[in-house]
Every structure is written in structure tokens, then in C-alpha cells.
Amino acid sequence: MSPLPQEDSLNHKLFAGGEVTLDLGDTKLLEPLKISSDPASMKLQGKFPVISLGLKDAKGSSYEQIEAGVKRQIAKLYKKHR
């Protein structure tokens, strides 16, 4: 199986714009983002792994407690994406 051309990938369309298919079969036309006009940035788009870190669960009444919560989230993501 050959890889999907970059211009057809959903990630590319999120930056450069284009038509995407939603979960229920509907389509939506995305407008290009300003960064898509920078060739150097678009050349690198999709070349590096990205993780999403949600901080809503890093709660506490002190800096130390919040820091510990962030560290737990990072450790959890590290284990998941080794």
C-alpha cells in the first residue's frame, strides 16, 4: 500500500484548506490558514510527531501540585507513544 499524497491528507488540508469529509458523510470546505502561504513552513508540515497535552486534569492549590499533575500527564503520554 502506497502512502497518501501529502496534499490529500487531512492534516495538510487543515493548514492549506480544502474539502474534508466529516463523520456522517457530510463535507466541509476549510479556508487556508495564513501560515500556508509560507513555503518553508509548509515543507515541514506533517514531518514531525505532535502530541496533544490537555491540562484540565492538572489541578491543585499550589504550584507544586499543578506541576506534579503536568508531569503525570507527560509520563502518561510518553508511555502511550513510546
Image (tube, rainbow, N blue to C red):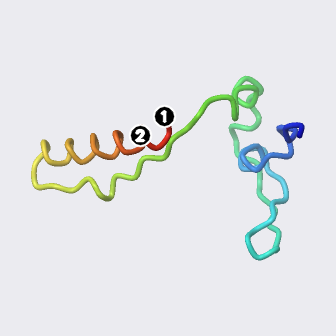
Taking the view exactly as shown, the residue that stands out farthest to the top is: 40
Tell me the quadrant of the picture where the N terminus can be found.
top right
- How dense is the environment of label 1, judged by Cα within 10 Å: few (below 14), some, or many (20 and up)? few
Task: Specify whether 11 is left or right of 19.
Answer: left
Residue at 73%, 71% (x, y): give it: 23
- Mark 1 near mark 2, Cβ–Cβ under 8 Å? yes
The picture places residue 71, in percent across and down from the top left corner, at: 27, 40
Q: Residue at x 21, y 56 (%)?
A: 59
Q: In this rendered view, identify the residue nearer to me: 59 or 40.
A: 59
Q: Nearer the viewer, residue 70 or 36?
A: 70
Quarter residue 6 falls in: top right
Residue 19, quarter of the rendered image: bottom right
Looking at the image, residue 9 sits to the left or right of residue 81; the answer is right
- Callout 2 secondary element: helix
For label 1, the residue is 82
Residue placed at 42% from the left, 47% from the top? Answer: 53
43 lies above or below 68: above
Q: Name the residue type under label 1.
A: Arg
Of residues 54 and 17, which is closer to you in this image? Answer: 54
Residue wearing tag 2: 79
